[in-house]
Every structure is written in C-alpha cells, then in structure tokens.
Amino acid sequence: MSDTAVVRYEVSEAIATITMARPEVANALNTQLINELDEAFDRAEADPDVRVVILAGEGKHFSAGHDLKVLVGQAEPDEWRKMRDTSEGRFHHEYVMYLQRCWRIHDFPKPTIAAVQGYCVIAGFVLACMCDIIVATEDAIFWSPAALMAGAGAELLVEPWEFGVRKAKEFMWTAPKLEAAEAATLGLVNKVVPPDELQAATREMAERIALVPPVTAQMIKETLNHTWDLMGKRDSWKYHFMVHQWTHSTATALASLERRKTHRNMSDLFRERELGDSVNGPVGE
C-alpha cells in the first residue's frame, strides 16, 4: 500500500487483517476506500497461506456508511460521481461499486470476520453483514436511518436475513440504534466484548477458524450460503436493488437530496449529533 492508502493489509500466520483507515471521517466509504478494499480481498484470496480474513475499521467507529460529501456534497467529483448525472450512470455506479463489491465479500471463498466498534451505519452496516461472523464491542451501534432520508434502505436488503422480517420492518421504519447486546440476541452479532478486547477476541476467533482445513471451511461456507440462496436471499437482493434505484429517483427522494446539498450536508448534521467533534469530515448513508 502507498503512503496515501486508506486501507491497510497485514498478514500474521494464517490470518489477514484488512483495516479501513479513514478514521478522521469515521471510515466513510469513498471510491478509493472501496477500490482498495477490493484489492485487499484479491490479495487475501490469492495467498494460499491466508485462511481467515478480518475486516476492521481504524479509530472510534467501524464505518459511517457512504461518504455523502463525495456523492452529493462539496468534494471534487471523481469519475463515478460524474456518472450519477444520469439515471443510467447512477445505476452503473451503484451496481458495480456497491452491489457487486458487496457480493464479492459475501461470496469470498475464505471465512471472514468483521470487527465492529462504535457506529456501524447504513452502508457500513451492510459491509459488516457481508462477513461470515461479526465480533462487536459492547458500545457498538448498528443503525440504518435511510428511510428518514427518503431512501428504501441501503443497496442490499440485509435486514430480514440478519434478524427476521418483523424486526427488519421495525429497524428500517423507526431507525432505532441497535446496541450490540440486542444485536447478539437477534443473531446479528456472534460475540460481544469490551472495547479494549476487540482485537484480541477477533484474533482468537480467527485462529480457531484457521484450524479448519481450507477446503473444508470453504465448502461449509458455500453450502450455508447456498442454503440462503435457496431461500431466496440473492433474488431478494436483486429485487431490492431495483426498488432502491426507483425510490431514490422519486420526487421525495430528490427533494431530500437537495436538502442534503444545501443544508450544510446531512453528513455534517450526523457528525455533530452522533459522532462528536472527533470526526472532521463526511459521514454518509
């Protein structure tokens, strides 16, 4: 990784740790971060010595979701944001950078563990859910207020598959801040630990999984993921992605988008109300 990289990649014995390193913006997901995550997973997949991958976020928070200042705010537009000037371009952007990149982690042939602390918000929540196991700190918060921003959730509908349809409705409609203890009760989180034990506990989990022969671990993962697919998970994701595209093109959603552009950006309000002064930059959906 270069000096300007926003993802760190480290391997120790049979475990690769991929760390999002934009703590100044609560690891909000921009184009560079998404691309570097993809490259890091490529490295881990190509390395025969890596048996387990840990996905972590540097700083106080796992991820605040999409970087709204990059998508709709004051940041200099990159090639992906420029695509979003048309409906076709917006669809291509979100299909390639969000849907396909998430599927890539979900279908990754080796076991993955998300180490979650602090806020895990909308797209950051989806990212954590792409991993096979989630270890969270006691103060971790899972939150998806997309409906309050006139959106139909994130690009992938993970909620009913993580904790059931009835709870998913409540979670998406009322936008509660789901604490780690309740998330564990619902089956979203595998293990809850004190904040200062997150790294050690995640490492311990990874080491235990690494004892499983690689082909065995891969086949178990493929079989369990296939079970979900037979239940309709992948088809539901495809359906919701199209619903997401349509909803974000409605007059209500477009008006909300304009408010985010002019009202000091939704990310500024979120930072002030939720994350405090420690985050000096964008937070997103």
Image (cartoon, helix red, strand yellow):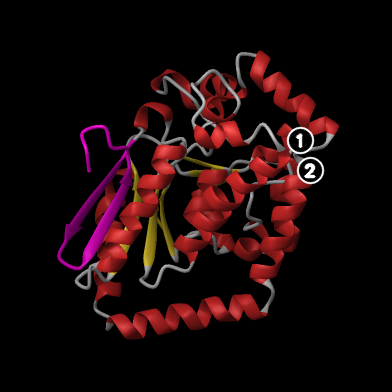
x, y percentage for residue 283? 51, 29
Is 273 part of what is drawn in magenta?
A: no
x, y percentage for residue 262? 67, 14
Residue occupying image coordinates x 29% and y 58%: 201
Q: Are marks 2 and 1 in contact (CB under 8 Å)?
A: yes
Residue 41 visible at all: yes
Where does the N terminus fall, quadrant-wise?
top left
Crowding near the residue tagged with mark 2, few <14, some 14–19, many ≥20 C-alpha atoms within 10 Å:
some
**In the orientation shown, which residue stands out farthest toward the right?**
251
> 59 or 34, which is in the foreground?
34
Name which residue type carries label 2.
Answer: Thr
Residue occupying image coordinates x 52% and y 26%: 77
Judged from the image, the secondary structure of the residue bearing numbered disc 1 is loop
Q: If you read the primary sequence from the N terminus, does the residue marked by circle 2 or circle 1 appear first?
A: 1
x, y percentage for residue 131? 45, 61
Range of residues picked out in magenta: 1-21
Q: Say if 176 sits above or below 203 in the image.
A: above
In the picture of the structure, the residue carrying the numbered disc 1 is: 150
Q: Say if 167 sits above or below 78 in the image.
A: below
In the picture of the structure, the residue carrying the numbered disc 2 is: 247
Left or right position of 126 against 252: left
Left or right position of 162 against 37: right
Q: CA–CA distance between discs 2 and 1?
A: 8 Å
Name which residue type carries label 1.
Answer: Ala
* Count of labels in the image: 2
Is 20 part of what is drawn in magenta?
A: yes
x, y percentage for residue 65? 52, 39
Residue occupying image coordinates x 47% and y 69%: 107
